């Protein structure tokens, strides 16, 4: 009889132990997907980063077409733009992480491309259209939240989009022209009009990544950014 009572008591203690363990486990489970207080800014940076990713892929594809067509002038410009876009995507991604979010690039996309002259025309049309549609709401949002860090990146991104339009507008006159990209912010230059310092981020001009006219001794520099 005593043995039976003892078994019941032990069973009761064990049940209570299991209940306490389950309760504690539930109580101490970290909250899933806790929302950063910078959520809206992170969404804006993510949209910017994803667009930059798609542009970098597309311009790289145009550069490959230009290389196959033996159009080194257009190849230099496309490669410089692709590099600039990739840098800006990286800047957006690291800003998102610093603000408590996570960044995932968009999945594979269908790239388009025809002959180089048509690609240049098409890019200019798309960039102009996209820029004309800008509302800059994301920049105002970052400024209104006093997040100057995010606002600065978004302003740099918009300024570089405009710079691309200027360079694409001169698409028929750059046979001898080379290009440079600021490694800090992705600002784009024609080497005919280089600044001593990047006006966006104050990186010295000698650190700019050059996309120079190719020679037998110096083939076109095609830098990549480690991910
Ligand atoms: Zn810069």
Image (cartoon, helix red, strand yellow):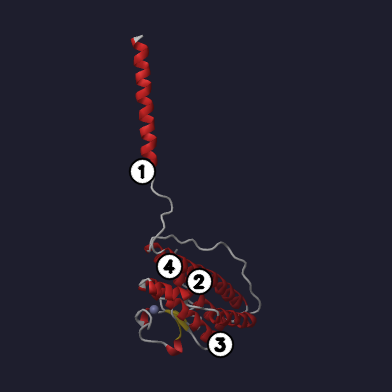
Q: CA distance from mark 1 to mark 2?
A: 40 Å
Q: Give the foreground label among 1 and 2.
A: 1
Determine whether label 1 and label 3 are within 8 Å by CB.
no
The residue that disc 4 covers is: 41
Which one is earlier in the sequence, the residue at label 3 or at label 4? 4
- Residue 45, relative to residue 100: is it above or below? below
Q: Secondary structure at mark 1?
A: loop
The percent coordinates of residue 125 (x first, y second) are 60, 82
Residue at the location (62% across, 67% down)? 110
Q: CA distance from mark 3 to mark 4?
A: 32 Å
Q: Secondary structure at mark 4?
A: helix
Q: Secondary structure at mark 3?
A: helix
Q: How many marks overall? A: 4
Disc 4: CA contacts within 10 A as few (<14), some (14-19) or many (>=20): many
Question: Label 1 CB, ligand 1: below 8 Å?
Answer: no
Which one is earlier in the sequence, the residue at label 3 or at label 2? 2
The percent coordinates of residue 74 (x first, y second) are 56, 82
Ligand 1 picture quarter: bottom left
Q: CA distance from mark 4 to mark 1?
A: 29 Å
Residue at the location (56% across, 90% down)? 173
Residue at the location (52% across, 70% down)? 51
Which one is earlier in the sequence, the residue at label 1 or at label 2? 1
The residue that disc 2 covers is: 52
Q: Which mark is residue 169?
A: 3
The percent coordinates of residue 54 (x first, y second) are 54, 69
Q: Residue furthest top?
A: 1
Q: Which mark is residue 28?
A: 1
Q: Quadrant of residue 124?
A: bottom right
Pick whichever, 224 or 227, lies toward us. Answer: 227
Residue at the location (38% across, 62% down)? 37
Pick whichever, 141 or 148, lies toward us. Answer: 141
């Amino acid at each position: 009889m005593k043995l039976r009572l003892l078994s019941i008591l032990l069973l009761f203690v064990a049940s209570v132990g299991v209940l306490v363990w389950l309760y504690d486990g539930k109580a101490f489970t970290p909250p899933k997907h806790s929302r950063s207080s910078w959520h809206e800014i992170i969404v804006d940076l993510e949209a910017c980063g994803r667009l930059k990713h798609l542009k970098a892929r597309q311009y790289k594809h145009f550069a490959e077409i230009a290389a196959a067509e033996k159009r080194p002038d257009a190849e230099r410009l496309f490669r410089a733009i692709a590099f600039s876009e990739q840098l800006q995507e990286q800047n957006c991604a690291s800003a998102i992480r610093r603000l408590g979010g996570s960044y995932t690039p968009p999945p594979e996309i269908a790239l388009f491309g025809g002959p180089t002259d048509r690609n240049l025309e098409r890019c200019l049309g798309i960039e102009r259209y996209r820029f004309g549609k800008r509302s800059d709401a994301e920049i105002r949002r970052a400024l209104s939240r006093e997040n100057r860090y995010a606002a600065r990146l978004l302003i740099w991104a918009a300024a570089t989009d405009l710079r691309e339009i200027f360079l694409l507008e001169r698409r028929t006159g750059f046979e001898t022209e080379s290009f440079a990209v600021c490694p800090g912010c992705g600002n784009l230059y024609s080497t005919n009009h280089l600044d001593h310092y990047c006006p966006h981020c104050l990186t010295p001009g000698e650190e700019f990544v050059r996309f120079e006219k190719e020679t037998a001794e110096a083939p076109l520099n095609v830098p990549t950014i480690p991910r």
